[in-house]
Amino acid sequence: MSSGGQVAAQSGNGVGPLSGYRVIELGSTVAGPFCARLLGDFGADVIKVEQKEGDAVRSMGKRHQGRSLYGASILRNKRIVSIDLRKERGRELVRQLCERADIVVENFRPGTLERWGLDYDELSAVNQGLILVRISGYGQDGPYSQRPGYGVVCEAVSGLREITGDPDRPPARVAVSVTDYITGLYAAFAASMALVERNRTGYGQVVDAALYEAAFSFMEPHIPAFHQIGHVAERAGPRLPNHTPNSLYPTQDGRYVHITAGSQSVYKRLVKAMKQPELLEDPRFATPTARSEYENDIDTVIAAWTETLTVDELEAVLDEASVPASRIFNMRDIFADPHYRARQMIISPKDPVLGPVAMANVVPKLSRTPGSVRWAGRDIGQDSVEILTNELGLDQTAIKALAAEDVIHGIESSD
């Protein structure tokens, strides 16, 4: 679909705060590539090692003209070399890349790097400043460590899945790989902290980021509640328990608006906007504690009011009253929204086949050394020759021999 001119041009060309650092990405699917993508967005030189058949992420999401639209974004800002890690010569090439790196990101099952001779002890013996980011389902040790761990499965283990969705239905899921993203974000944060520590000591370290633990950390309010009073958190649908009103409400034209007015000051503004001052006197609704006990009743009253207005009218009234609220945006709303446009939150670097391809801009925004999107995701092995030549010093004869042995791929694109 055309963006109608709402998509910003490519992000700025600033070098970013991680400029000068080298990252080797050995991961696949979402958590590892997202972690490395974050580091690349802020200037790190990311080299992604990819198998001949391509990262599984290239087959996720929608495709257009034979191209992975997801890959265009999550593989952005990365140079891509295709090396077969299942072969000893391939592992030796990757070992050499890791020995020259600041950070290595991997999300294989624990023990895989050890079997390949790419474990931290081996690599750090040559490069004492190396930071190894290890992302796995359940961590590098413990009784579950050898279980295959996908984000949504580990989300179930974390308890987060149990509280997602409506109470009268089975647990729902967010329609993106949210736990992979949470873990990738933690891992990138940890890698940055490890760089700060290395600048003081000269030594690297291992980051152990587990999918289930990252998701479990988002259960923060429910952990002490169970420990102290035995409360087991349950699905609450669109509501935020014990903070009422804070839910979805229907509009006259079939849309929904989420209103958050649990605090007393905001609730008073909402009541004024509704022109129903009696809601401040009714003992069921007069205080935050009382409203939490009668949330069905207050939500029924508010819904009866919101259904008299269209979504545009309702948002205008609530905005005028300074009540936090919003329609539930879909992607069409986002592409048309003036605030997204003003903040340049959608950018469109060029792909050689797709042309400009829209994706989310870099976040968060740094005032002096902002990140940038320098290019969209590249093809499998697109940078193989350049990386093997410039980073490992191989000549054309050696590169062609490796290609003939099926150790490396992608050199045909540079012939």
Image: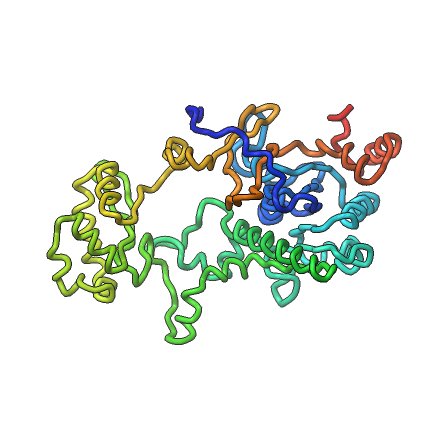
Residue drawn at 45 percent across, 64 percent down: 220
The image quadrant where one finds the N terminus is top left
**Viewer-proximal residue, 275 or 207?**
275
- Residue farthest to the front, as pictured: 368
- Residue farthest to the bottom, as pictured: 228
Residue 398 percent location from the top left of the image: 87, 34
Residue drawn at 56 percent across, 24 percent down: 354
Residue 301 percent location from the top left of the image: 17, 52
From the viewer's perspective, tell me whether residue 151 is left or right of residue 173: right
Residue drawn at 68 percent across, 58 percent down: 110
Residue 292: in sight, yes or no? Answer: yes
For the image, the number of numbered tags is 0
Residue drawn at 70 percent across, 51 percent down: 103
**Viewer-proximal residue, 362 or 94?**
362
Quarter location, residue 16:
top right
Please say which color scheme the image uses: rainbow
**Viewer-proximal residue, 263 or 63?**
263
